[in-house]
Amino acid sequence: MENNEEKKMKTKDYIYLGLYLVLFGSFITTIIDGVESEKEQFTKINKLNNDLIKISNYVEENSRFLNSLEGSIYDHSTLLEDVSRRLQEQETTNQKFYTMYFDTQPQRVEKKEPELIEEVLEEGNQDKIATPEPAPLVIEQEKVLLPIEVPVVKITTASSCPTPHTQLLPYIKRVTLRKDYKFVANYDVLDNKITNLSFTNKLPSRLQTALTKYLNSFKMNGNINGCYLPIKILGE
């Protein structure tokens, strides 16, 4: 009887052990599947983050390019406005000179020659001896040109603001720019040098020094007051 009971106990133990192993194996499989699923999700999230970083870098690069293009368009439009203004000033100067030149030219005055009067013999006595009519007297007059003093016109080149150029980067490449700067530089020109320089916005001292060197590199054309130049600088 005891042996039968022992055999029954062993059989039950084996059954419990088998169920335990099955449950444990199922638990391990579930854990493994969960780890694989988490690993796969982590890979997808990592790939998504990399894609977002690439998109962000692409947008930033294109944004810088667009800002640089906008600054270049602004500089060229300013240069075209200055060239147009100079052409108008030159056209006005030329027109004044042409008008003055033609107004001071000597004018030729034609004098009318005196009319010659023919003497006509009255018809009268036919017995009188006919005398030939004297030939008309023609007096040739020389045309005399009166000397007219033509004033000497001195042509002076009109002063104008310096011609700007777009080579600003070599002057500010050593200046640290932590933000964008948009301002207008007001200045005068005296003896081929920039004077009375001021800026519409507050700028760092190193940037002001670099801009002063940049403005003095322009091609000067006489002394003039009231010049200005709009400038836009993109920060890093």
Image (spheres, grey):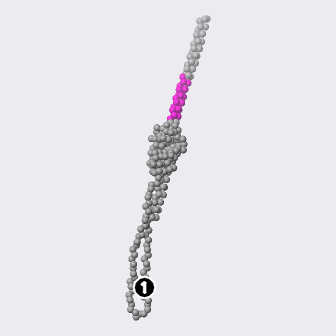
Q: Mark 1 — residue? A: 119
In x, y percent, where is residue 158? 46, 54
- Quarter occupied by residue 154: bottom left
Magenta-drawn segment: 32-54
Q: Residue at x 40, y 93 (%)?
A: 128
For the residue carrying disc 1, how many other residues have a C-alpha within 10 Å: few (<14), some (14-19), or many (20+)?
Answer: few
Q: Quadrant of the N terminus?
A: top right
Q: Residue at x 46, y 37 (%)?
A: 174
Determine if residue 9 is in view.
Answer: yes
In x, y percent, where is residue 26? 56, 20
User: Nearest the camera: 70 or 172?
Assistant: 172
* Location of residue 206 with respect to 81 vertically, above or below: above
Q: Residue at x 48, y 57 (%)?
A: 92
User: Nearest the camera: 48 or 210?
Assistant: 210
- The single residue placed furthest to the bottom in the displayed view is 127
In x, y percent, where is residue 234? 51, 40
Determine if residue 74 is in view.
Answer: no
- Quarter occupied by residue 139: bottom left
Q: Please state which amino acid type lies under the numbered disc 1.
A: Glu
